[in-house]
Image: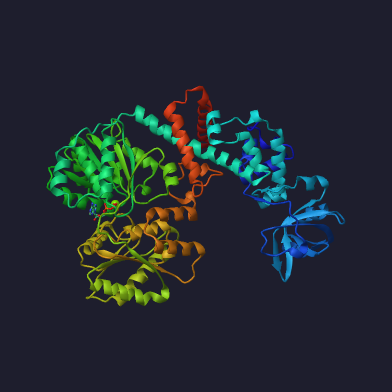
């Protein structure tokens, strides 16, 4: 029944079906059923025309037509209807479909009018209202919660406004029986979680009688959406654990111990110790590790990576680390060289700008096993790069890499190496559970000791001189400063102009020879970038003007001020990332957000959030609320985009329960073979099948 083409639904027919397909992608009965209302209104209450105000989100009136006229010509043509009850008069206006409407409407008929009133030239009018004859039948169908559906202009022209869709839903539901909508939860789970049946939930989501009924219908359908994503992810994880053999890192050897005893420059934080232990246990278990390491910027993930890599070496394996940018790869290489310089091991750096001779040599030495540790960029995943026995892959700043790239690295050995994915973009728990639900996670939730919280302030253009004064004062104290400009593809030309202007401006405000300024951006060659970077790292320059190239990972402890220009143009997670570039040394650090005067509500909230907190997780929650999950990288393949009702920013509780329940089901019955779990097996396969079909069409 649900697979029946939509034109066969009573009241639809081929023409309306065409519009539904084009406008909303509704092809089958089942598609219409999941075209959920986007809100509900109370339709039992009527307003008197006298009560109309712009404050009301909508008004419902009852009355008769006093006058009806088509006015204007051509593009300005419209239908104006004077509508009255015994308290007053209001104008109804149609700018489209007016001829048809004019024919339908009759004087003297008792009508119900529903819409949003706006004040125009001192008079209230309602544009494109719903208008229906107030027959006893219609009145009796008015419910306390009437569903409102999304519709488009083209649909409205075919009578498929919200009201039209509601009619279609009514027809559809009256034809459906419980057996047409197979249950997708086992009886046990439904009872335990007190879920209403799926069939009832569909009826009640479209035609709820009470708010409580509506809430329960929503919970049931959201639960299903989230549950099946989790079931899929957790099943993947379990299957991998059972079928994919991992290398066993059984011992802690000389590399690790020597480093720990003799070269570790500081005491590990409790969180670093805990995470290292988690990694050791996992990599020693015989299953292949797939672990996500989350830790706020500056929490010391690099060291954890380094020590995990030593563990790989101790067990006779090679290890590699992949970073998203050349600068970052170089920096990692420098850090590793400094820390591991005295250990008997060989490291190499491979990036896009490695010369072909050096590159060839690296390839050979990787194959022979001479090189133990390889650090690099995307260049690492080229097919030509082959290892003798790669045992551990570390991916830094995961959000820059796609799932496909991750997979490619994993395929670098016949037996997939352990994988550690590090991300400094804290993501809300709900999102992590869904994006990385198939991975195990470790969290570094503690910063190295002695760090002072970064102070963040928001300034507007008029306060620029004050900001310069502050910068000079900091330079006087021997500190260094980043000044970052936004750069996005769409406005690249303008953005470079702004950057250049800003740079020129700084040159006059901070004159040589007292002040030296570096500049780094994407239009420089790698050598130029590297040279500028080095000048700053060595302290030869006090100010580094840059685009977001420096966003990720760069570590210069003496840099203690981050000035972000046009901060309103950055997203929250990017702002937080940028701020994380400072506050790495012992000095008090500062972040200065420069914006224009006028800020929209979202921008204001972003600035206020940054000023208020340094907590990456808290920031990520606000970010999720502002942007929704669709804009967050990696969401495309995750199933999040299939969510129609559930909202990760709001339904964390349901998600958590859904995950627990899915885990419970799999713990007992990993392959879903028990009779009571048949529903899960069938529904999972159905979803998988649908996905495959869609990707074929795509
Ligand atoms: P991130 O997690 O952002 O990658 P890094 O690994 O770059 O952070 O570490 C940030 C800074 O903290 C580095 O300068 C590093 O040397 C330092 N650091 C890391 N661990 C500790 C520790 N346990 N005690 C003191 N400083 C540490
Ligand atoms: Mg890092």
The location of residue 83, given as percent across then percent down, is: 80, 61
The location of residue 691, given as percent across then percent down, is: 51, 35
Q: Quadrant of residue 541?
A: bottom left
As drawn, the residue found furthest toward the right would be: 108
Q: Is residue 175 visible?
A: yes
How did the renderer colour the structure?
rainbow
Instruction: Classify 334 as above or below 454.
Output: above
Q: Is residue 541 left or right of residue 103?
A: left
The location of residue 46, given as percent across then percent down, is: 75, 56
Residue shown at 55% from the left, 33% from the top: 190
| Quadrant of the drawing holding the N terminus | top right
Q: Is residue 376 visible?
A: no
Q: Is residue 47 left or right of residue 567?
A: right
Question: Considering depth in this image, is 678 or 362 the residue closer to the camera?
Answer: 678
The location of residue 195, given as percent across then percent down, is: 57, 36
Instruction: Classify 189 as above or below 42.
Output: above
Q: Is residue 642 left or right of residue 28?
A: left
Question: Considering depth in this image, is 341 or 264 the residue closer to the camera?
Answer: 264
Q: Report the number of numbered marks.
A: 0
Question: Considering depth in this image, is 669 or 537 the residue closer to the camera?
Answer: 669
Residue shown at 72% from the left, 71% from the top: 121
């Amino acid at each position: 029944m649900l697979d029946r083409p939509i034109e066969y639904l009573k009241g639809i027919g081929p023409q309306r079906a065409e519009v539904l397909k084009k406008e909303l992608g509704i092809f089958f009965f089942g598609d219409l059923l999941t075209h959920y209302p986007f809100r509900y209104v109370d339709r039992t209450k009527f307003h008197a025309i006298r009560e109309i105000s712009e404050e009301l989100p909508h008004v419902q009136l009852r009355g008769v037509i006093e006058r009806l006229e088509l006015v204007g010509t051509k593009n300005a043509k419209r239908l104006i209807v004077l509508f009255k009850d015994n308290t007053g008069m209001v104008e109804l206006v149609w700018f489209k479909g007016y001829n048809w409407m004019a024919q339908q409407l009759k004087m003297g008929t008792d009508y119900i009018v529903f819409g949003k009133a706006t004040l125009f030239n001192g008079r209230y009018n309602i544009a494109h209202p719903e208008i229906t004859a107030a027959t006893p039948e219609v009145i009796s169908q008015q419910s306390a919660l009437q569903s409102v559906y999304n519709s488009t202009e083209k649909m409205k022209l075919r009578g498929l406004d919200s009201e039209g869709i509601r009619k279609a839903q009514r027809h559809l539901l009256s034809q459906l029986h419980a057996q047409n909508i197979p249950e997708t939860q086992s009886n046990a789970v439904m009872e335990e979680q007190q879920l209403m049946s799926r069939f009832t939930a569909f009826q009640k989501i479209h035609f709820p009688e009470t708010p409580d009924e509506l809430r329960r219908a929503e919970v049931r359908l959201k639960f299903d959406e989230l549950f099946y994503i989790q079931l899929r992810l957790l099943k993947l994880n379990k299957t991998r654990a059972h079928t994919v053999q991992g290398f066993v890192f059984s011992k802690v050897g000389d590399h690790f111990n020597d480093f720990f005893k003799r070269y570790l420059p500081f005491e590990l934080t409790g969180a670093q110790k805990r995470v290292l232990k988690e990694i050791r246990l996992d990599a020693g278990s015989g299953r292949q590790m797939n672990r996500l390491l989350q830790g706020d910027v500056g929490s010391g993930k690099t060291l954890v990576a380094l020590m995990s890599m030593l563990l790989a070496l101790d067990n006779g394996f090679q290890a590699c680390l992949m970073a998203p940018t050349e600068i970052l790869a170089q920096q990692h290489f420098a850090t590793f060289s400094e820390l591991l310089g005295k250990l008997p091991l060989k490291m190499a750096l491979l990036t896009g700008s490695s010369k072909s001779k050096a590159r060839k040599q690296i390839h050979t030495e990787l194959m022979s096993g001479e090189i133990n540790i390889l650090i690099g960029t995307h260049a690492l995943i080229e097919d030509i790069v082959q290892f003798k026995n790669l045992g551990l892959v570390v991916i830094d700043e995961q959000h820059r890499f796609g799932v496909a790239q991750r997979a490619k690295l994993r395929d670098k050995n016949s037996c997939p190496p352990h994988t550690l994915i590090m991300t400094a973009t804290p993501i809300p728990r709900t999102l992590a559970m869904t994006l990385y639900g198939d991975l195990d996670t470790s969290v570094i939730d503690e910063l190295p000791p002695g760090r002072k919280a970064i102070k963040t302030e928001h300034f507007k253009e008029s306060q620029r001189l004050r900001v310069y004064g502050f910068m000079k004062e900091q330079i006087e104290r021997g500190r260094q400063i980043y000044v970052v400009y936004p750069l996005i593809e769409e406005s690249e030309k303008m953005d470079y102009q702004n950057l250049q202007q800003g740079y020129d401006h700084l040159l006059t405000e901070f004159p040589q020879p007292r002040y030296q300024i570096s500049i780094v951006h994407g239009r420089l060659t790698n050598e130029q970038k590297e040279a500028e970077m080095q000048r700053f790292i060595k302290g030869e320059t006090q100010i580094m003007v840059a685009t977001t190239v420096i966003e990720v990972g760069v570590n210069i402890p003496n840099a203690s001020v981050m000035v972000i220009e046009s901060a309103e143009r950055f997203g929250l997670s990017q702002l937080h990332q940028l701020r994380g570039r400072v506050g790495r040394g012992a000095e008090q650090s500062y972040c200065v957000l420069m914006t224009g005067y006028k800020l929209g509500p979202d921008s204001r909230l972003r600035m206020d959030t940054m000023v208020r907190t340094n907590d990456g997780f808290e920031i990520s929650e606000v970010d999720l609320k502002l942007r929704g999950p669709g804009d967050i990288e990696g969401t495309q393949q995750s199933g999040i985009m299939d969510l129609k009702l559930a909202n990760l920013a709001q339904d964390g509780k349901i998600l958590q329960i859904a995950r627990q329940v899915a885990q419970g089901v799999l713990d007992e019955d990993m392959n879903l073979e028990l009779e009571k779990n048949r529903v899960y097996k069938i529904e999972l396969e159905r979803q998988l099948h649908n996905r495959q079909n869609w990707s074929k069409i795509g």
